[in-house]
Amino acid sequence: MFERLIRVNFLGAVNGIETVRRDFVERGAGEIVLTASVAGYRGLPYAAPYGASKAAMINLAESLRPELARAGVAIRLINPGFVRTQLTDKNDFAMPGRIEPEVAGRLIAGGWPDGSSRSWCRAGSTG
């Protein structure tokens, strides 16, 4: 499970970045949007493979942001909390602040005025 989630959640993003990185840097413009999770900031029981893959994504974004910013390329990091999906509907544990997909979409699409990456823990709050 660890290898599969690292391959999909992390290395898939790395491959995507490498596909566009050179062109964006040569143009001096571009935006790369990565999706991690609040689970990447703190270990959750029974979620070690998932959390580790998301922690790697957060570290990647934080490391690339200053490098690519000098070349005019922005890195955006989306760190959702619990969003109601078919997957989260199967969970048998509490999911504090779980939000509807439409709310998550509005938060993601609306962005944050200061351009920073943010995480949300419940509908209407960011931190």
Image (cartoon, rainbow, N blue to C red):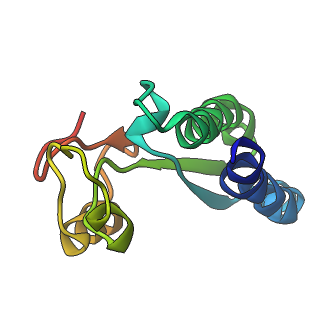
What percent of the width, then of the height, locates residue 17? 77, 57
What quarter of the picture does the C terminus occupy?
top left
Would residue 5 be found to the left or right of residue 107 on screen?
A: right
Residue at 35% x, 50% y is: 80
Identify the image quadrant of residue 41: top left
In this orientation, which residue lies closer to the viewer: 64 or 28? 64
Identify the image quadrant of residue 85: bottom left
In this orientation, which residue lies closer to the viewer: 7 or 102? 7
Residue at 61% x, 39% y is: 49
In this orientation, which residue lies closer to the viewer: 112 or 11? 11
- Residue lying furthest front: 92
In this orientation, which residue lies closer to the viewer: 70 or 53? 53
What percent of the width, then of the height, locates residue 51? 53, 36
Residue at 42% x, 37% y is: 39
Would residue 50 be found to the left or right of residue 19 on screen?
A: left
- Residue lying furthest top: 42
Identify the image quadrant of residue 15: bottom right
Would residue 71 be found to the left or right of residue 120 on screen?
A: right
Query: Where 46 falls versus 16 (above or below)?
Result: above
